[in-house]
Amino acid sequence: MPLTRAEIQQHNNRQSCWVAIHGSVYDVTDEHPGGAKVILRCAGRDATRDFDSVHSLELLAETLPETTLRGHIESDELVDSAKAKTTKANDHTSSPAQTNSNDVPPPPPLNTLINLHDFERVAEQYLAPNAWAYYTSAADDELSKRNNSKAYQQVALRPRVLRKIPRVDTVTSILGHSVALPVYMSPVGIAKYAHPDGECALARAAGEEGLAQVLANGSSMSVEKVRQSRVTEDQPLFFQLYVNRDISKSVESVKRAVKAGARGIWITVDSPVVGKREMDERMNLDISATDSNAQGEGVAKVMASSISPFIDWDILNWIRDLTDLPVVIKGIQCVEDAVLAYEYGVQGIVLSNHGGRSQDTAQSPLLTLLEIRKFAPHILDGKMQIFIDGGIRRGTDVLKAIALGATAVGLGRPFLYSLSAGYGENGVRRMVQILRQEIEANMTFLGATCLKDLRPEMVNTSRLERDLVGSVKL
């Protein structure tokens, strides 16, 4: 049914909220794809630009029932919500993948970026404020986020010399799939904040560089679209799952992932509720100033509002009834739970505190790995792969984790930073190449020709061991 501009603009509040997206008009009073506060800012207007900056069109079909469609309108008949803001200073959300100021100079050439910290500095300058806040924020005082990196700095390497190292081999296997580096792409949400191609650009870069990718449950792109972006058919793509309060939606997500060719399901368990990410919340406080009920609600809280806090270890039986794909539990933070996962027979675990984004002061994943080495070394027998993420920024960090028993390490934020400033796939590839060079050079320093040569005796963990828990009950 054709609608007029006047008809749509009447529905511009919380009680009756209509938006136009690509010419179709939806009543989203009860359904808010992308978040209630963002949608309310677009109420009665054309939300196409705001929607496209974060999501792919597939999200509409996935989240909005047909009953929400009210009609159609020519796009030039309606005010674009992105143009309706009063000043650029208040524009925190338009074009997040673009530079946040007209005064920002062109980004530096990729060949001038020589470490992962360089990509972060560029991203801070070129991402829109709300995108930067969402990506970089962590919980409360952000102690866990900082300690994740600090833990690696507390571990020293013990190089061996006078060993003939004509070349080094960095190839390893993740859940039975060969990869070129012991590094994988951790699941990260809303990659379109960094670049219009989002997770598809990550998939292409992963294929070219021989990495595995774990696609986030809250990704900008559908699993089908990301699969189509792979460079080769055997390129490993895994799917991360947050268990939804509406379990039928999780069933559908798993079935879609399996059909799309996912090679494993990674269940995230360290965020039954959302951490208090204050930078993210502050950035969104002014979106609905006229709403007397408005509270600080960042992008993270909006994205995670449907996550179920009611799951327990029985979720493994549920997932095994759905698929025979390998199952990885992401978010193990103590040796006790690592042992339970081993006993439940999962194929892998990720030692992770969600990048410091969930519970602040949760111990670093590297410290959890030391707990395992001290109190439950039997689970390092190879039956269950152990992955680790959080705070990894150098090739030496990667090698320390591998030497202590990790199968591979995951990186999240650095991949998003490398997408930004218009770099896209090329930026991601440059970042991986830098990490590869650091890994290869430091393997040579250590006297290791392959990853299996990396042993616990090559690292000195005495400083970090001071923080180990005194005893555990297994």
Image (cartoon, rainbow, N blue to C red):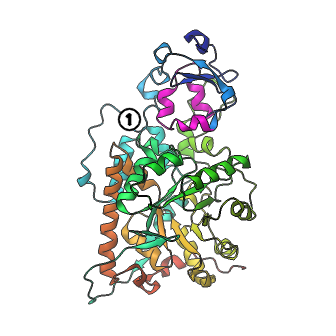
Which secondary structure, mark 1? Answer: loop
User: What is the quadrant of the C terminus in the image?
Assistant: bottom right
> Percent x, y for residue 95?
42, 33
> Residue placed at 25% from the left, 82% from the top?
166
Of the pair 212 and 342, the residue shown nearer to us: 212
Return the residue found at the far bottom: 162
Q: Position of residue 325 (x, y in %)?
A: 61, 64
Residue type of the residue flagged with mark 1: Asn
Horizontal and vertical percent for residue 199?
A: 45, 48
Q: Does the image show residue 166?
A: yes
**Residue 21 drawn above or below residue 192:** above
Name which residue lies at 63% across and 53% down. 254
Res 342 → quadrant:
bottom right
279 w.r.t. 372: above or below: above
Residue 112, percent from left and from top: 24, 53
- What residue is drawn where x is 65% and y is 35%? 295
Magenta residues, start to end: 35-62
Q: Residues within 10 Å of mark 1 (few under 14, many from 20)?
A: many
Quarter of the picture containing the N terminus is: top right
Out of 103 and 426, give the one closest to the viewer. 426
Question: Is residue 70 shown in magenta?
Answer: no
Task: Answer with the quarter of the image where residue 339 lies.
Answer: bottom right
Determine which residue is flagged by label 1. Answer: 100
**Left or right of residue 467: residue 119:** left
